[in-house]
Amino acid sequence: MTWFCKLKRKIRVIITVAAWILAVVVGGIIGSTLPENVESVPPLQACIVLLLLTVATVFTVFAVIARRREKKAAFDALQAEKQKAAAAQAEADMQRKMQDRRNIITVMPDGSVVVSFHEGGKKVYTPDEAKSLNIEPSNDMWSDYYDESDDEDIDIDVHISSGVSLPLHTKAVGVTFDDRQACIKASNVGDALTIKHAPLAKFPEASIIVNDRTGKTLGSVKKELALQLLDEFGDHFVLRGSITDITGGADGKQSVGCNIIITEVA
């Protein structure tokens, strides 16, 4: 009866109900044809009724078994999906924890070095100071600088600057999506902004611009600049800035835009 269990649930139900209807109808027909004074059902007719009842019972049993298997398979699939999601979350948490325990050394285009410490704060060294501390990009000895911490769990991430420097003027893009037009119209020049990496499945470099006063998203950073910021400041960067100008909305222009300045790392 494997073939029966592989059928769709609706078809299994129809077959089972039809088997019982057939058994009842045939039994009724045979019973109606028997004389009133007969003491027993003829063997052939009794075998037919018994066979139909057996088939109906078998279909019922296999329908119940098939349904239980379906429920178990659905439950197992749900549990597997939950375990997969939990494993992915655990991996993300571990990566975030590792990121939080990372000292980042950024080598600027002029040869100066910025050291960002995992516990907070940063130091800026001139090219000569960086060279004396063995934290120049051509030297593999920068870990000596952290020997005094005696913490083997701290990672050191060396980053060569792509040349992005703050403050940086740019404009918000994607300002016509969602309710961003209303958000820009509700904003004022000088409002503080948060510019942060907000990756999407199709756009891993995506970065959004949020008005700190209203808490609303005004737009995004253009792709080319977003890639530079991602290369410069790493995943999940958070920067600060402000609105320098709100454009459009006059002289027949329906849509409004927003010019901003990015000033510092959060």
Image: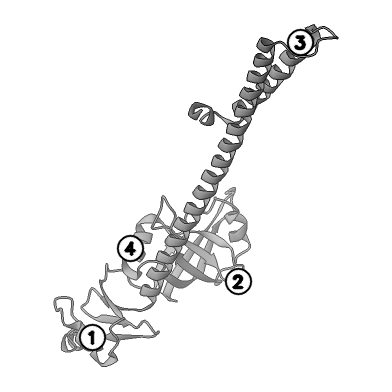
In primary-sequence order, the first of circles 4 and 1 is 1
Whether pointer 3 and pointer 4 mark residues with C-beta atoms closer than 8 Å, the reply is no
Q: Distance between the residues labelled 3 and 1?
A: 104 Å
Using the numbered discs, state the Cα–Cα distance from disc 4 to disc 1 in whole angstroms. Answer: 23 Å
Tag 3 and tag 2, C-beta contact below 8 Å: no
Which is more foreground, mark 3 or mark 4? Answer: 3
Closer to the eye: label 3 or 1: 3
Q: Name the residue under label 2.
A: 213
Say which label, 2 or 4, has the lower sequence index. Answer: 2
How far is the residue under mark 3 from the one under mark 4? 85 Å
Looking at the image, is 221 positioned above or below residue 123? above
- Circles 2, 4 touching at the beta carbon (< 8 Å): no
Q: Which of the 4 image quadrants contains residue 248?
A: bottom right
Residue under numbered circle 3: 29
Relative to 95, residue 253 above or below? above
Secondary structure of the residue carrying tag 3 is helix
Q: Quadrant of the C terminus?
A: bottom left
Q: Mark 4, residues whose alpha carbon is within 10 Å: few (<14), some, or many (≥20)?
A: some
Instruction: Assign a secondary structure to mark 2.
Output: loop
Quadrant assignment, res 165: bottom left
Residue assigned mark 1: 126
Report whether residue 231 is seen. Answer: yes
Q: In this view, does 129 lie above or below 260?
A: below
> Which of the labelled discs sits on residue 228, or is there none?
4
Q: Residue type at mark 3? A: Ile
Residue 167 is left or right of residue 113, and the answer is right
Sooner in the amino-acid sequence: mark 3 or mark 1: 3
Q: How far apart are marks 2 and 4 (CA)?
A: 27 Å
